[in-house]
Image: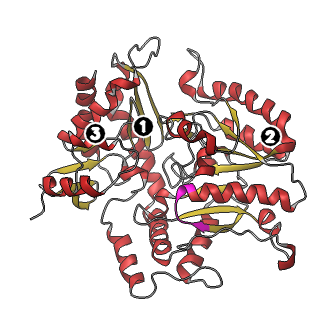
Amino acid sequence: MNTNHSLAQRDFSVLWHPCTQMQDHETFPIIPIKKAQGVWLEDYDGQRYLDAISSWWVNLFGHANTHINAALKDQLDNLEQVIFAGFSHEPAIKLAEKLIEVTPDGLSRCFYADNGSAAVEVALKMSFHYWRNKGRAAKTKFITLENSYHGETLGALAVGNVPLYKETYAPLLMNVISVPSPDCYYREAGESWVDYSTRRFALMEQTLQQHADTVCAVIIEPLVQCAGNMRMYDAVYLTLLREACDKYQVHLIADEIAVGFGRTGTLFACEQASITPDFMCLSKGLTGGYLPLSAVLTTDEVYQAFYDDYVKLNAFLHSHSYTGNALACRAGLATLEIFQQQGIIEKNCQLAKTMAKVATRFHDHPQVAEVRQTGMILAIELVKNKHTKEPYPWQERRGLKVYQYALSKGVLLRPLGNVIYFMPPYIITEEELLLLAEVAWQGIQHAV
């Protein structure tokens, strides 16, 4: 009979887990999950855990969602996978049509890949290749924000800027131009998010002015730098950036992999600035947390730059074996149906207010520098000194102590360093949010 202990031992002897120092699991065993329902995970010993981070930000409508389950069961009886070069299928076509319908105006072509990093790689290559096809071969550079994260394949890692992920592999990476972030955590006392984000944009403007002739694109995470400790900024920055990219003839890549599909309060974060990027990268919530799939949405102008006689060798040569996987596309369709049929964005607005309410007590905690929120993302920043924002030494691993305590109380929190965050499925109840907040509070007390 399988137990947590027996499976954890077997796991430890054969598996290597992501973003993990495996030696930690000598003393803190991996937890094997047997089943899941709604916002709850259950292990082999019958212990349940509230999935407060949507299983790494992917699960939007709960585990074992009946609508998505039914769609996948139906699809299984018809088609699971087919080569996507020279062939197609209805789920991929319908999903592309729906994505074009719901994303910002002007995005009219959909290119599939199979994870978020791959989507970023596609967008980077498309932008570079576009300028090459247009006879502007000097455009080879990318501009990125400090503290940004775009994935861990080499191109995506290069345009990210979180040292923890990037420094080790720096010799392998292309050089990029980094611009200071509009991260509002560092605004002056009394300064608004709008004012700070506007002030910080001057640094981006200067960089574009200086390097436009050699830059393909600026890549950003709209509104929230998720892996960069859930740091946030105002939508005015996006508005100004779109104007500047047009002015200097540079593409804008919006990495909405983590912030898309309702996370920031609108279906896509770019909507809050009323802008259309040249490329929009989507993944994570795209399939409701069921299957790997990503998509890059772009404009007809970009598409037409590749549409030519074969002998000119202008085609975009990028492929994945599972491009446009039928099962994943069907899950994506089911996910969008839930958004449209159940008024999820409107419900999330109310749910976000409830999240803010249950987190009110954290504002006055002596070791909390800031409680910040954008839509369905709420972050609590632990610090050694509240007034100076002096952080705890990272070696003390305060966030890990919160994580371990929360698991002992049946809640899955996975802090980013010393930042505790709530990013739950959209079906979480007020009672479950209250439980989450209480366990987080007690976990922080335990850790500090």
Residue 239: horizontal and vertical position, in percent? 71, 41
Q: What's under tag 1, amino acid-wise?
A: Leu
Q: In the displayed structure, does residue 144 sit left or right of residue 290? A: right
**Residue bearing the label numbered 1:** 378
* Quadrant assignment for the C terminus: top left
Please tell me whether residue 295 is drawn above or below residue 213 in the rendered image.
below
> Mark 3 highlights which residue?
24
Measure the C-alpha gap from mark 3 to mark 1: 27 Å
Q: Nearer the viewer, residue 393 or 345?
A: 393
| Residue 279 percent across, percent down from the top left | 69, 56
The x and y percentages for residue 89 are: 56, 83
Range covered by the magenta-colored residues: 112-117
Which mark is first along the chain, 1 or 3? 3
Q: Considering only order in the chain, which callout, 1 or 2, is on the residue closer to the N terminus? A: 2
**Left or right: 207, with 392 as reference point:** right
Q: Is residue 74 above or below residue 97?
A: below
Of tags 3 and 2, the one toward the viewer is 3
List the residue tagged with mark 2: 244
Asked if residue 255 can be seen in this view, the reply is: no
What's the residue at 87%, 73% (across, down)? 312
Gap between marks 3 and 2, in whole Å? 46 Å
Going from N to C along the chain, the mark reached first, 3 or 2, is 3
Residue 329 disc label: none
In front here: 396 or 442? 396
| Residue in front for this viewpoint, 377 or 280 | 280
Q: Secondary structure at mark 3?
A: helix
Cα distance in 3D space between marks 2 and 1: 30 Å
Determine whether label 3 and label 1 are within 8 Å by CB: no
Quarter placement of the N terminus: bottom left
Q: Quadrant of residue 11?
A: bottom left
